Each structure stands twice: as C-alpha cells, then as structure tokens.
Image: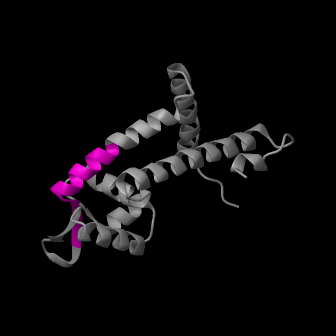
Amino acid sequence: MDMEARGRSEHPEALRLWLRLLTCTQLVEKQVRSQLREQFDTTLPRFDLMAQLERKPEGLKMNELSRRMMVTGGNITGITDQLVNEGLVERVEVTGDRRVCRVRLTPLGRSQFDAMARQHEGWIVAAFDGLAPPEVEALHRLLGKVKQHFNDTPLETA
C-alpha cells in the first residue's frame, strides 16, 4: 500500500496532496535506485555522495559531506571507503590539520559519475513524461510557492 492510500475523502485536501507528493517521490526514487543498480551496479547513496563531490572539484571534508547529505559520519565513512577501494574517490590531506582530509573524485570517478548523471537526468525527465511541458512548469511554480512559504514562515514548535 502506498502512502496515498492512507488518505481518505474526509481528510483535508492538503493532507491528501502531501500523501500524493510523498508517494510520487517514493515511486521516482524506487525507479532511480533500480536503474542505478541495474545499469551501474551502484546505490543511490553512492551516487549522491559522488554528486556532492562533482560540485566541489577541490573536494569536501567528511563532516561537510555528512551535513550536505544529512546522514551520519559513519555512513559517509563507509561509502567513502568503498569508493576509495574502487578508485572512484581519493582522500587528500588538509594542510595544517593531519586529523582532517578532503574527499574528491578521481578522474575515473568523475568519468563514471558523468555517465551516471546523464542517465539519471533521463530517468527524471521520463518520470514526468505523463505531463505536458506547461504542466511541469505549473507544478514547479506551485511547489516553489510551498517552498517559499516555509522560507517566509518560521516553524512552529509544539
């Protein structure tokens, strides 16, 4: 049963919308995970870590990666270790602090990430094939309004 099936007609429309958004997100993510596994023998967390490094050619410290990916340092270390062993990323010492290192893509890692990123873009575009371009634009604009609302309104705490 998907998340949307939890909604009932008596629930507020906004709750049913949230459940539909969550369901769609999960469906797209499931497809992307499957395609990464089938075509590249990799996982979404590995792809995400490489995507962060692709944006910062000089590399990122482990704690920066952890913060950007919103996962624990232990998770980052495990993924990084795998990618180092495969020659896709490297650890580079930070001058003046021997306790810290930067992680960056190797040339092989950059090449493999570029191939994955091209495919990933195609999968995401295909996920929205059921919508006409003006509908994609409208949905993007409307979700931008939701995002802006959160940026403009402080979170309420109970």
Whether residue 31 sits left or right of residue 5 in the image: it is: left
Residue drawn at x 58%, y 49% as measured from the top left:
26
SS assignment for the magenta stretch, majority = helix
Q: Quadrant of the C terminus?
A: bottom right
Q: Is residue 125 above or below residue 60?
A: above
Q: Is residue 112 magenta?
A: yes
Q: Position of residue 10 (x, y in %)?
A: 87, 42
Q: Position of residue 74 (x, y in %)?
A: 40, 75
Q: Which residues are magenta?
A: 101-117
Of 94 and 46, which appears nearest the observer?
A: 46
Q: Is residue 4 magenta?
A: no
Q: Is residue 37 above or below residue 119?
A: below
Residue sitting at the far bottom: 99
Whether residue 44 sits left or right of residue 158 in the image: it is: left
Q: How many marks?
A: 0
Whether residue 137 sits left or right of residue 89 in the image: it is: right
Q: Is residue 82 above or below residue 53?
A: below
